Amino acid sequence: MEAIVPLNVIVDNLTEMTSLFGDVAAGAGLAPLLVLMGTILVVFSLGVFGLLTLGAVGDLFTAN
């Protein structure tokens, strides 16, 4: 039961961080555009490296 208290603190911090980040991301100026471009960049790079990893794992199990 001692591990539940830090987990509750972590979950509370995550929910608070999400609301604070939402306020900043929806702010004035170029902030929404910067958040959108950052999201696109991260998703694209995750997709590319995910495909490369799947290709490498597939190459391990296929015959030459």
Image: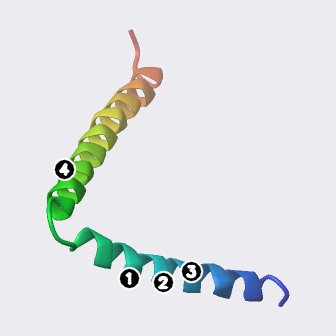
Q: Are marks 2 and 1 in contact (CB under 8 Å)?
A: yes
Nearer to me, 3 or 64: 3
| Callout 4 secondary element | helix
Q: Which residue is mark 3?
A: 13
Contact, mark 1 vs mark 3 (Cβ under 8 Å): no
Measured from the top left, where is residue 40 in percent x and y?
A: 20, 49
Question: The disc labelled 2 sits on which kind of residue?
Answer: Glu
Disc on the earlier residue, 1 or 3: 3
What is the distance, in whole Å, between disc 4 and disc 1 at their CAs? 20 Å
Q: Tell me which residue sits at (14%, 64%) in the image.
A: 29
What mark, if any, has residue 19 been given in the picture? Answer: 1
Q: Residue at x 48, y 83 (%)?
A: 16
User: Which residue is located at x 28 percent, y 41 percent?
Assistant: 47
In the rendered image, which residue does mark 2 sit on?
16
Query: From what the image shows, is residue 24 above or below residue 46?
Result: below
Q: Residue furthest right?
A: 2
Q: Which residue is mark 4?
A: 37
Q: State left or right for residue 1 relative to residue 36.
A: right
Q: Position of residue 42 (x, y in %)?
A: 30, 46
